[in-house]
Amino acid sequence: MSRLGSYTVPDSVISATALTKKYKDFVAVDGISFEVAPGESFGLLGPNGAGKSTTMRMVGAVSTRTSGDLTILGRDPNNFGPSIRSQLGVVPQADNLDTELRVRDNLLVYGRYFGLPRWQVAKRADELLEFAQLTEKAKAKVDDLSGGMKRRLTIARALINDPRILLLDEPTTGLDPQARHILWDRLFRLKEQGTTLVLTTHYMDEAEQLCDRLVVVDKGRIMAEGAPAALIREHSSREVLEVRFGSERNATAADELAGIGDRLEVLPDRILIYAQSGEEALVEVTRRGLEPITSLVRRSSLEDVFLRLTGRSLIE
Amino acid sequence: MIDQSASAIRAQHFGAWYVTEHKIRAMRGYAGTVVATAIGTPFLYLFAFGVGLATLITQNVGPVAGVTYIEFVAPALLASAAVLVAMEEYTFGILLGLKWNPTFVAMNATPITGRQIVDGIMIFIGIRMVITTTIYFFVMVLFGAVPSGWGVLTIVAGMLGGFAFAPIAAYSATILEDRGQFAILQRTIVLPLTLFSGTVFPLTQLPLYLQWIGWLSPLWHASELGRQFVYGPTEPIWLTVVHVLYLVGLGMLGWQLTVRNVTRRLNK
């Protein structure tokens, strides 16, 4: 908090401290702490079941926390749920558009829930259909839209109240690459306009594209926090050499590779060699008389960070 | 620029109406079916029972002489129609919003609360019942089945009957997996209640050990209440008061339980 005259201005729009959610014996979110600054694009990266969606529901002021502290836009969702929600836009993981309504009508009814007058909702709806590139589909049935269009409509719907924070739970899961890129482009525009974005994803490329800063979560806990590039620098080498020897030779080859690069990661189908220079590592591999079936040098990614931190892949 | 604090206050006051507005807009898609059913049903039933079956029934109709069979059966048929409409929303309507097409979850992501969602749905069900029972009443008039000037109140009696089934909505809100519970509900509760609620014959015709089903049945209370308005009074005033209290009480109980269950389910 900082003081500005007599007003207390929150530096962060979201502040979570030891946030916990339990369902009977199962701990879905296990004491996570993070802050999100206004205008920031913040991500929660983790595999399915990491507690990302549960965290998002608590931040969305619809799920009561078991313990810990949570402040959204300076207020506690336990006491100010509706007033906090009036300033949020929510894109849930599963589409919940009303399939009994046409495309534009979905925006109209949703806008009314924010207490907006009809004329204002109608104006916003047309602007947002334009933004979501759905103007021509205004009268279409929701079920006739493609997966990507439904997601864009859901995002348009979430923007109807001009929210201060946009929450996106797995925004591109299940979409084909082209639809994902269209969606990323739209989200990037929002980011440029200064909308605070909070998104969960298990796609490292999505996190790298859209997030200024992120936390890596696993089993309800935060494993690491930072900007994507910084996380990679901190937890991984600059490059990765991936070599395949076939499933039978994989394990034995790993012994012979010992000492090359900074670190080895043996996966069932391939071996990852973390090194400053992937090419130099490959030269060393062949010098030792090993002949991989395939080899690939690439930059380190958040996937490697996750593997390093948890010993598991993001997508299993 | 949108003034979010002002809009949040409006949502706090009128949230339930926004939910109703949403449901009405969605109903436009099947409004034709709703109206056609509301008009067609009374004609079919009043012909079948009030005209057809009535030719066989000349005695033991009601506790008072001079009441025709169609006058006796029509208020009960009207109440049944209201119950049918309400039941559709209490079962499929609730599970649609919570599970099949979770629009309640979407509503709850806005300033709208679980209570406002349920209130809005109840208002919507009320509107659907008004349409159905009003049309039913006019068809009754057409059939000459409304001797008393108070008869118009049978609309209210029928609606209270539908309202009294609200506990079913509370139950629906707890269903996680659809395993045909609604079909079972229909066969084990609604159908027996229709048969043993003094709908097409007076409850007193049943042996005493079956009459209690009628006393518990909201449909019996609603039918009897409607009959008081259509050709009554035929019972002591205290019993009429009991009908009203029983129906209102059950309805309020169901409404509050539905609010509780829906709110719990949304806050997971």
Image: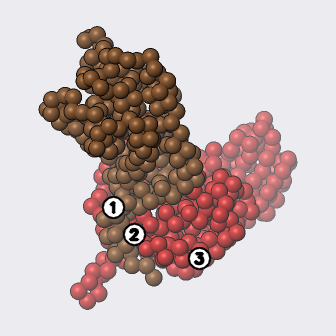
Chain colours: A red, B brown
From the image, tell me which residue sits under label 3: A127
Q: CA distance from mark 1 to mark 2?
A: 15 Å
Q: Do marks 3 and 2 share a subunit?
A: yes
Which image quadrant: the N terminus of chain A? Answer: bottom left
- A156 and A56: which one is in front? A156
* Residue in the picture at 27% in, 43% down: B150
Do we see residue B244 in this rendering? yes
Q: Position of residue A219 (x, y in %)?
A: 47, 47
Nearer-N-terminus badge (1/2): 1
**Which circle, 1 or 2, is nearer the viewer?**
2
- Seen in the picture, residue B201 relative to A1 is either above or below; the reply is above
Q: Chain of mark 1?
A: A
* Residue in the picture at 22% in, 38% down: B244
- B103 and A154: which one is in front? B103
Query: What element does badge 1 sit on?
Result: helix
Q: CA distance from mark 3 to mark 1?
A: 28 Å
Query: What element does badge 2 sit on?
Result: loop
From the image, tell me which residue sits under label 1: A81
